Amino acid sequence: MNYLIGAFKPSCNISITFADGKSRKQVPIKKENGQTVMVPLFQSQENISGKISIEPLQGKKVEHNGVKIELLGQIEMYFDRGNFYDFTSLVRELDVPGEIYERKTYPFEFSTVEMPYETYNGVNVRLRYVLKVTISRGYGGSIVEYQDFVVRNYTPPPEINTSIKMEVGIEDCLHIEFEYNKSKYHLKDVIIGKIYFLLVRIKIKNMDLEIRRRESTGSGANTHVETETLAKFELMDGAPVRGESIPIRLFLSPYELTPTHRNINNKFSVKYYLNLVLVDEEDRRYFKQQEITVYRLPETS
């Protein structure tokens, strides 16, 4: 059977290298097989260039109907795994039909590429960018090679960033006010706030502040929502008294946050919430949730 297995092996090796691959920042990305690999980091409007090398195996030639490279931005829903929706698709034809007998190198360039969305790996969806090289062949099936890269886009600090002030209460039992210093935070920011107890007639055991990520995919009846609690921060242990004020100081940098993604290509959204949880002595839980916007500041080298 060995000769049969050999018949289906690719008759060449394909390598894809980026022009500035040695100097460009590399970031980790998790592959489908669970392995983590380092890939180059780009942002929208950058040039993506490099070279493709095709090397036939010893004593073999590669007959083909053309060689091309594509730059693809794709969204994949995990409940529809294997079906990619392309929101960006650029093609460069590298070679006309012919035969390759020895190692052949092709330069490629995609100029000022519009990459509006960030790379994202979620619970039910992923957004990826990939270079795809195809050696078209009629009979033995095309030979395809992929190279991932990551896109991150940066946002300047918002000009208006209002604080969040809210009141929460149970009539004649509990009345608290809480305040967060702003409503928009960058990924390495600090949430600073205060909680005031105006009326306390139930015995509160403890109080936590949670950061929650809500990922919604699909639309209409086919909407899937996944909520993850990324951080839990104990604000208070024990019963507060009327007039007491509790400070909040929560650093975001230890947590794996992404920017807020709103309706990405009508496929998915990712939103973040601050969730205040109070637990009384009878283990009843009281919640107050508030959305915050998370954004990525330009990185300072």
Image (cartoon, rainbow, N blue to C red):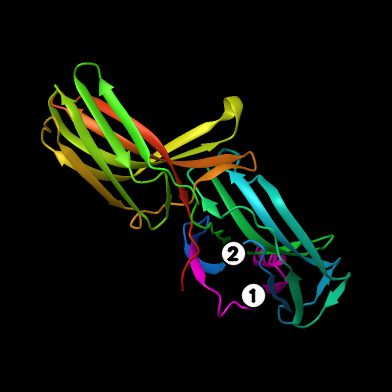
Closer to the N terminus: mark 1 or mark 2? Answer: 1
Identify whether 184 is placed above or below 289.
below
Q: Determine the image quadrant of residue 209.
A: top left
- Label 2 environment density (alpha carbons within 10 Å; few <14, some 14–19, many ≥20): some
Image location of residue 292, percent across then percent down: 42, 42
Image location of residue 160, percent across then percent down: 48, 47
Identify whether 170 is placed above or below 142.
above
Q: Is residue 66 left or right of residue 113?
A: right
Circle on res. 255: none
Return the residue nearer the eye: 129 or 252.
252
Identify whether 112 is placed above or below 167.
below
Circle on res. 149: 2
**Residue placed at 88% from the left, 70% from the top?**
96
Q: Amino acid at mark 1?
A: Phe
Quarter of the figure that contains the N terminus = bottom right
Image location of residue 15, percent across then percent down: 66, 74
Q: Secondary structure at mark 1?
A: strand
Q: Is residue 142 left or right of residue 27?
A: right
Q: Determine the image quadrant of residue 208.
A: top left
Are the two marked residues, 1 and 2, in contact with CB atoms closer than 8 angstroms? yes
Q: Secondary structure at mark 2?
A: strand
Q: Amino acid at mark 2?
A: Phe
Identify whether 282 is placed above or below 301.
above
Return the residue nearer the eye: 295 or 148.
295
Image location of residue 297, percent across then percent down: 48, 60
Q: Which stretch is magenta?
A: 1-28
Separation of marks 1 and 2 at Cα, in angstroms: 10 Å
- Label 1 environment density (alpha carbons within 10 Å; few <14, some 14–19, many ≥20): some
**Residue placed at 58% from the left, 51% from the top?**
127
Q: Which residue is mark 1?
A: 18
Return the residue nearer the eye: 177 or 230.
177
* Residue at far top of view: 172
